Amino acid sequence: MKKLPKSALLSLTLLAASFLQACSQSPATNTFSSTQGKLTFTGSSTVAPLVKAIAKRYQAKHPKVQISIQTGGSSQGIKDASQGNVDIGMVSRSLKDQEKKLLPFTIAQDGISVLLHKDNPVANLTEKQIVDIYSNKINNWRQVGGKNAPILVVSKAVNHSTGKLFAKFFQMEMKDIVADQIIGDNPEAIKAVKNNPNAIAYVSIGAAEYDIVHGAPLKLLPIKEVAATIANVNKGTFPLYRPLNLVTNTPPTGLKKDFIDFARSEKVHDLVRQKSFVPIQP
């Protein structure tokens, strides 16, 4: 039996190595390409823009996955997730005792504060003044050191957790709020204040800070003498903050679990910061 030349042996060795390398890589490639299915979300308008950004990045890696995201408020997300109408609910608060049958997965932290127009000379409001404004006991800015102008009170619809948290923090009930304008989500509240220098609203610090950084004529007021900034939410010094959650009615598996794990990972921390929220720590 003749021996093969060294050059032939080298070629066979390289061919075998290439074959083994291809085999070792193929499972990962197949797993990536075969990830498919559909995920549906409803809920918080605060959480939705972040989930949309995360979903876009997830779909770039898994193009066969379809994702549908609708808002409607945290209460809607709770209801739809509880009844199995959607795969995942979006909730911008902690779960209440009667909602503990749902499983929450925090993807970021956010704060809530009072928003005024930049041209409004009022730089600070006490907790009592905020309560009196929202209960119509104070209805002119000159009563709190501002101009002689009526206060346009902007509040959220009752199914939005931002309003419930705001009212609870200031020891009010949503029914006690006397609003001139009812809005549905943060962009609407921000638009209302941008368009009227006499308006007041409560909003997500993350959403408002993003617009302020990009030139919107707005300002966030401090609460308990702590500046309303994402940095202070991050440090844990801002008093009115909340978790931003994804919720499911059963322990997530498969595609649902894979997306939630991705949304909670460091792979999306840059997106969380871009939306002016605070990333969760492992």
Image (cartoon, helix red, strand yellow):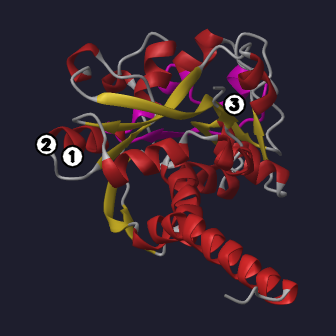
Q: Amino acid at mark 2?
A: Gln
The residue depicted at 45 percent of the width and 51 percent of the height is: 259
Q: Nearer the viewer, residue 64 or 42?
A: 64
Position of residue 102 measured from the top left corner of the image (x, y, whole percent): 26, 29
In the structure shown, which secondary structural element does the residue marked by tag 1 occupy?
helix
Q: CA distance from mark 3 to mark 2?
A: 45 Å
Q: Nearer the viewer, residue 59 or 168?
A: 59
Picture quadrant of residue 104: top left
Magenta span of residues = 133-162
Q: Amino acid at mark 1?
A: Asp
In the structure shown, which secondary structural element does the residue marked by tag 2 occupy?
helix
User: Dividing the image into 4 quarters, which one contains the N terminus?
Assistant: bottom right
Position of residue 180 measured from the top left corner of the image (x, y, whole percent): 45, 43
Q: Nearer the viewer, residue 96 or 217?
A: 96
Mark 1 = which residue?
80
Mark 2 = which residue?
83
**Residue 187, relative to residue 33: is it above or below?**
above
In the rendered structure, the answer to whether residue 190 lies left or right of residue 13 reads left
